[in-house]
Amino acid sequence: MIKKKTELKGYKTQLEKVNGEITVIKNLLSDKQKELNEKKKLVSSLESKISKIECNGEIHISEHAILRYFERVLDFNLDLVKEEILSNELISLIKFSENANGKYPFKDGRVVLKNSTIVTITK
């Protein structure tokens, strides 16, 4: 009986200690969350200031918007463009090299391949 009481007291002491540690961790976590939120606000403010300076009142056009203009306004068929770029000759050349990265001859320039994706075409 005395052994069980001693064992029970030991468990209760351990429980109190662990609960105290949990409280400390929760307080630290709360403090860090507040600090994180303040840093996020600062980042947002700095990004806004940078954007205002970089923009300098000028309106810019994204490459995506230009691509959609070609596709939707000028009626360029992008699938045909893809087929022209990804010719059987180029496919064979890339497969022969067995490399997902590199530069390959293309018309009067080269295609640049990264991770099996053509990322640009150079002259």
Image: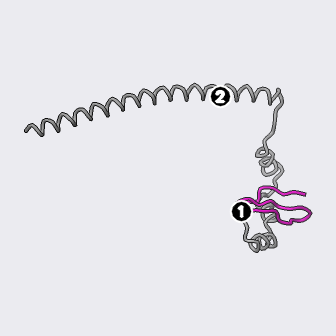
Asked which quadrant contains residue 37, the reply is top right
The residue sitting at 48% across, 26% down in the picture is 31
Boundaries of the magenta span: 101-123
Residue 108: x %, y % from top left: 92, 63
Q: Which mark is residue 116?
A: 1
Left/right placement of residue 19 relative to residue 29 reads left
Q: Which residue is mark 2?
A: 44
Residue at x 81% of width, y 60% of height: 81
Q: How far across and down, in percent of the image, does residue 95 sit?
A: 74, 72
The image quarter containing residue 98 is bottom right
Q: Is residue 89 left or right of residue 19?
A: right
> Could you say which disc has been placed on residue 53 in the image?
none
Residue at the spot 41% in from the left edge and 31% down from the top edge = 25
Does residue 95 belong to the magenta stretch? Answer: no
Residue 106 in the image, given as x and y percentages of width and height: 86, 65
Mark 2 Cα within 10 Å, few/some/many (few <14, many 20+)? few
At numbered mark 2, what does the secondary structure look like: helix, strand or loop? helix
